[in-house]
Image (cartoon, rainbow, N blue to C red):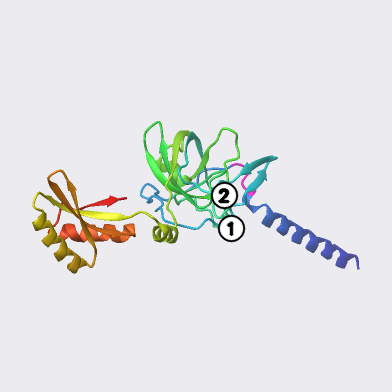
Amino acid sequence: MQRTNALAVILLASILAACSSSQNSRYDIANDKAPTSAPDVSKVEDAHPKFEPYSRGGNKANYTVLGKSYQVMDSGEGYQAKGIASWYGAKFHGHLTSNGETYDMYSMSAAHKSLPLPSYVRVTNLKNDKTVIVRVNDRGPFHEDRLIDLSYAAAHRLDMLKTGTANVSLEVIYIANPESIALAELKGTELHFIQIVASSNKTRLDLLANELEKKYQVNSRVQQSNNLYRLQLGPIGQAQLASKLTETLKQQGYPQSYLITE
């Protein structure tokens, strides 16, 4: 009976130890450090900015860490800042980021306290003008004097591994939702005209206007300024269509064509 109880105690202790290890695995290494046998990261490509919807899990409006509250921005559009960058490595490698992804210190990624996740940021080391583009997918650094935490690969590219920190400038590369852009164009009230050619011979322009209207199925107008007449195609309601037609006209014999918006 005593042996059975002893085995039960040992088994329970093992289970608790395993649970504790699982919960605190991100902090198994007391202090962060560089990888012991890192691959060559000098040729790791910058993150490639593209439109990505902000994640649900990583963008709580407010959150608290170490007793301090932080507010997440609704959008990163137009964000610029200067401050101190640090980097994080082996201690967090392979563990989940705030965005629910797996942290890879050999990728071009970063952590920021308030930018929406994910965001793309151009980071410039102000000491040597070296630049990288990172994808922000994590929260941090939670130090009063730190602005951004960079991956090992990004820190290597900025030549800041030895110093540990660097004075940097940040600029968000904002990519708008293509569907929102298209919808805004459809709802737009601006009218677009394509300036084709100018001439003092109105009769010539009237003949050309008739020809272009039939060819491109677009209305035209001839505007007079003193003794000069300007032939314009339009109005065209959608900027995208107007731009495409302008390029077509340039390639088909009217290289001086340009877009006018009213």
Q: In this view, does 126 lie to the left or right of 23?
A: left
- Point out the image quarter for the N terminus: bottom right
Specify the amino acid type for callout 1: Arg
The Cα–Cα distance between marks 2 and 1, rounded to whole angstroms, is: 22 Å
Q: Mark 1 points at which residue?
A: 56
Q: Is residue 61 left or right of residue 229?
A: right
Q: Which of 147 and 56 is in front in this view?
A: 56
Q: Does residue 165 show up?
A: no
SS assignment at label 2:
loop
SS assignment at label 1:
loop
The circle drawn on residue 150 is: none
Q: Earlier in the sequence, mark 2 or mark 1?
A: 1
Q: Residue 89 placed where, x, y %?
A: 52, 46
Residue pictured at 61% horizontal, 46% vertical? 29
Q: Is the magenta stretch mostly helix, strand or loop?
A: loop
Q: Residues within 10 Å of mark 2 (few under 14, many from 20)?
A: many
| Magenta-colored stretch includes residue 182 | no
Residue pictured at 41% horizontal, 38% vertical? 124
Residue pictured at 56% horizontal, 55% vertical? 99
Q: Which of 198 and 18 is in front in this view?
A: 198
Q: How crowded is mark 1: few (under 14 residues within 10 Å), some or many (20 or more)?
A: few
Q: Name the residue under label 2.
A: 92
Q: Nearer the viewer, residue 227 or 118?
A: 227
Tell me: residue 85, above or below residue 77.
above
The magenta segment is 27-31
Q: Does residue 83 show up?
A: yes
Report the label total.
2
Q: Which of 69 and 16 is in front in this view?
A: 69
